[in-house]
């Protein structure tokens, strides 16, 4: 018994590692820009009297996050003049993107939305691109904080990154809303424009804090990348400026993919990609239709806000940290199986709610269970793909694997409404079907579980 308690305390102590604080900060840096282009921009446009459809269309700028893997190879390869030498490869890219966001906020502070809507949305798009680019680098730097053989620390780091993102997003939102309200109350006419200058100060403070995040200035990343270039050039057969250029471009784009298949072998690599694509589909089907379901069952907006949003945030943060401890103790792959089973069981709770009708206590239990399973699944998933990447191409491989997971959720789950309609609104059967959707991914994981080359299973 005491030995078991000691194990738990040792697992919790992993969070005391100074690197976890750095990863928390990186998560916050990643989450903060969402405050600017989600809540702040939408509310600003609303209070300026723009229509709901205009605000909705402005949300298209979020599309860039789904495609940031396309330029991830550039982030792994290209060095920023002056900044890379002074700060390191990863921090140099983050600071450059933060400068872009800072300039964008300054431009926003000078704009009248009704007169310059196109410019305002254009600047919002620039912020989204800078934020999506920064995310690639933040994820790479987070992974590189932990050594390749530290599976427990990687699980803890994954949990801290998720908590950090939510902290940056929620805390940033609180700062933005209270600041805007304060400026409005003291009679400043362009109170949102002034608020963006204050949020710019937050960006500067994050850059100062970033200097405390360690990054080795000398790595063998460039050396290994050049080795891949030489291998490609040898395949081309001759050495001249044209073949050198082709080898460089091919190495930049194809190197991460070649490395992934070479490290794992073709069949294991395909199994990993299948698992990553399929793992969260059942959860995505449920998530896409959940608000519609709550309304149809008869819950008010207030009830949905209390149970789904407020309780949801607290549950997510707490169980993300617990999920990290579980992954440290049981291993990442076992945690994936547990999270998959938990996701399936949660969907059964929603089926029960559909069959019994409106019940506040069952609604609360279902929502909290859903948040717990999502927290466990997210920690395990982030830790899993973090352990899989080759440190020569950290940014590209992580961005690719994460986007494959996102693609599975967004493409297949877009048919969730059509499935409910096909079932003639039979929500119970819909949730039963989503329960079984996790099985194909777990079969993929079961087949490859003993052959995956990661630090800790």
Image: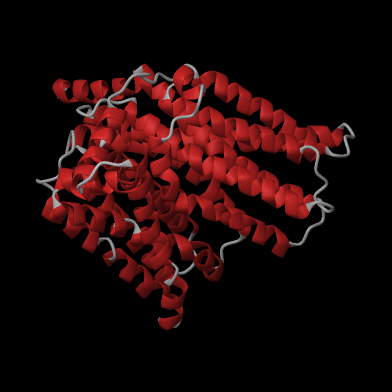
Question: Relative to the observer, which residue lies in front, 320 or 98?
Answer: 98
Question: Relative to the observer, which residue lies in front, 320 or 32?
Answer: 32
User: In the image, residue 258 lies at what x, y percent?
Assistant: 23, 47
- In the picture, the quarter occupied by the N terminus is top left
Color scheme of the displayed model: secondary structure
Query: In this rendering, would 174 be left or right of 96?
Result: right
- Identify the residue at image location x=84%, y=52%: 115
User: Is residue 271 among what the camera can see?
Assistant: yes
Q: Looking at this view, name the residue that lies furthest to the left.
A: 450
User: In the image, residue 59 lies at what x, y percent?
Assistant: 62, 56
Query: In this rendering, would 260 be left or right of 86?
Result: left
Query: In this rendering, would 326 be left or right of 375?
Result: left
- In the picture, the quarter occupied by the C terminus is top left
Q: Which image quadrant for residue 323?
A: top left
Q: Which image quadrant for residue 76?
A: top left
- Identify the residue at image location x=68%, y=34%: 103
Q: Check the image and report above or below for 333 versus 176.
A: below
User: In the image, residue 383 lies at what x, y percent?
Assistant: 29, 38
The total of numbered circles placed on residues is: 0
- Identify the residue at image location x=33%, y=47%: 246
User: Is residue 318 among what the camera can see?
Assistant: no
Q: Check the image and report above or below for 260 versus 54.
A: above
User: In the image, residue 46 lies at what x, y percent?
Assistant: 76, 53
- Identify the residue at image location x=45%, y=77%: 418
Q: Check the image and report above or below for 425 versus 104.
A: below
């Amino acid at each position: 018994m005491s030995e078991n308690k000691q194990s738990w305390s040792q697992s919790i102590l992993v969070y005391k590692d100074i690197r976890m604080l750095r990863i928390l900060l990186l998560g916050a840096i990643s989450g903060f820009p969402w405050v600017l282009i989600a809540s702040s921009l939408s509310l600003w446009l609303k209070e300026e009297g723009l229509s709901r459809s205009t605000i909705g269309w402005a949300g298209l700028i979020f599309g860039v996050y789904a495609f940031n893997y396309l330029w991830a190879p550039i982030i792994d390869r290209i060095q920023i003049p002056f900044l890379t030498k002074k700060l390191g490869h990863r921090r140099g890219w983050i600071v450059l993107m933060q400068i872009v966001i800072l300039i964008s906020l300054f431009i926003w502070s000078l704009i009248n939305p009704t007169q310059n809507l196109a410019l305002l949305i254009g600047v919002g798009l620039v912020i989204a691109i800078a934020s999506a680019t920064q995310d690639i680098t933040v994820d790479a730097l987070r992974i590189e904080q932990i050594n390749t053989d530290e599976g427990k620390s990687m699980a803890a780091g994954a949990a801290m990154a998720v908590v950090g993102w939510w902290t940056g997003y929620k805390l940033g939102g609180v700062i933005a809303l209270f600041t805007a309200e304060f400026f409005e109350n003291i009679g400043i006419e362009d109170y949102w424009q002034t608020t963006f200058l204050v949020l710019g100060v937050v960006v500067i403070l994050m850059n100062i804090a970033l200097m405390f995040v360690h990054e080795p200035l000398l790595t063998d990343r460039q050396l290994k990348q050049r080795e891949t270039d030489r291998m490609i050039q040898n395949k081309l057969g001759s050495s001249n400026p044209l073949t050198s250029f082709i080898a460089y471009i091919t190495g930049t784009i194809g190197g991460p993919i070649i490395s992934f298949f070479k490290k794992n072998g073709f069949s294991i690599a395909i199994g990993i990609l299948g698992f990553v694509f399929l793992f969260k589909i059942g959860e995505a089907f449920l998530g896409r239709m959940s608000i519609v379901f709550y309304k149809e069952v008869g819950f008010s907006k207030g009830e949905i806000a209390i149970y789904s949003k407020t309780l949801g945030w607290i549950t997510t943060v707490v169980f993300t940290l617990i999920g990290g401890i579980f992954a440290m103790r049981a291993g990442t792959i076992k945690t994936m199986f547990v999270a998959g089973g938990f996701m399936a069981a949660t969907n059964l709770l929603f089926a029960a709610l559909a069959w019994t009708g409106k019940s506040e206590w069952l609604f609360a239990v279902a929502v909290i269970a859903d948040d717990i399973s999502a927290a466990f699944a997210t920690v395990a998933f982030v830790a899993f793909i973090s352990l899989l990447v080759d440190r020569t191409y950290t940014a590209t491989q992580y961005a690719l694997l994460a986007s494959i997971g996102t693609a599975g959720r967004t493409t297949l789950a877009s048919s969730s409404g059509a499935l409910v309609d096909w079932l003639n609104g039979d929500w119970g059967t819909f949730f039963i079907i989503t329960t079984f959707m996790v099985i194909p991914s777990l079969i993929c994981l079961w087949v490859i579980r003993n052959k995956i080359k990661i630090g800790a299973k």
